[in-house]
Amino acid sequence: MAPSRWPGVPTQSDEELLRSARQGDDQAFRVLVERYEGQVAATVIGMLGPGDDAADVGQETFIRFYRAMGNYRGDAKLGTYITRIAINLSLKALKRRQTWVRRFVSRDDAETLLAEPARDGVRDVEARTRAELVHRAIGALKPDQRAVVVLRMLEGYSTRETAEMLDVPQGTVMSRLSRALEKLEGLLGPQLGPEA
């Protein structure tokens, strides 16, 4: 566990910090945010790509968690619970993004906007890395497949944990992952070349 900048708190468990946060201890809540903000950021960026949407969903995740602290029963690890909030909010953001694109953008431009996250400044083709190619390919997946890839392959959750977070059977996780990996192989094979 990474040390906290607040003295006396780094050795406290999630349960102890949560108990204190529920009693109004803002410092304890800040430590929980500090512990899980990297995990939430990785999940949200994996789902939405870098940008304002991801930052907004990351912040909203902790706002929702703060409001729902009293409802957390401890059935899953706290990190799993928070990640589930992040995934649900990311899926909603993807749905809003697709709705906006269908409403205001022509069909030809829609594929480009959905498959490629917006970036500030001029696009520099030569500066794209393999990671960006992979991210774009993940962005081309259906949201339910993208969620499984992010949780299983990028975040390293087990099939069981992924199933719990998405509230689906483990078999569904495995079939979505299989279809997603097949599609990624088709999308990335020619772009990554023999070195991949």
Image: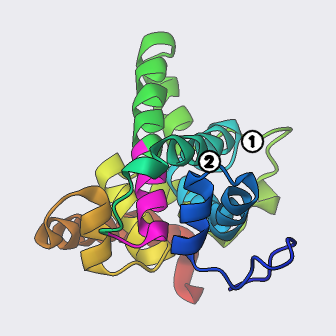
Rendered position, 114 above or below 128: above
Q: Nearer the viewer, mark 1 or mark 2?
A: 2
Q: Of label 1 and label 2, which has the lower sequence position?
A: 2
Which quadrant holds residue 21?
bottom right
Residue 183 magenta: no
- Image coordinates of residue 147 in percent, x first then y, are 38, 58
Label 2 is placed on what type of residue?
Gly
Residue occupied by mark 2: 58
- Image coordinates of residue 23 in percent, x first then y, are 59, 53
Q: Is residue 125 visible?
A: yes
Q: Residue furthest front?
A: 23
Numbered disc total = 2
The magenta segment is 76-88
Q: What secondary structure is marked by label 2? A: helix
Question: In terms of depth relative to the viewer, which is nearer, 158 or 131?
Answer: 158
Q: Residue at x 33, y 71 (%)?
A: 181
Residue occupied by mark 1: 119
Q: Residues within 10 Å of mark 2 (few under 14, many from 20)?
A: many
Q: Residue at x 23, y 72 (%)?
A: 178
- Image coordinates of residue 124 in percent, x first then y, are 82, 50
- Image coordinates of residue 104 in percent, x first then y, are 50, 11
Label 1 is placed on what type of residue?
Arg
> In this figure, which colouring scheme has been used for the structure?
rainbow
Question: In terms of depth relative to the viewer, which is nearer, 16 or 66?
Answer: 16
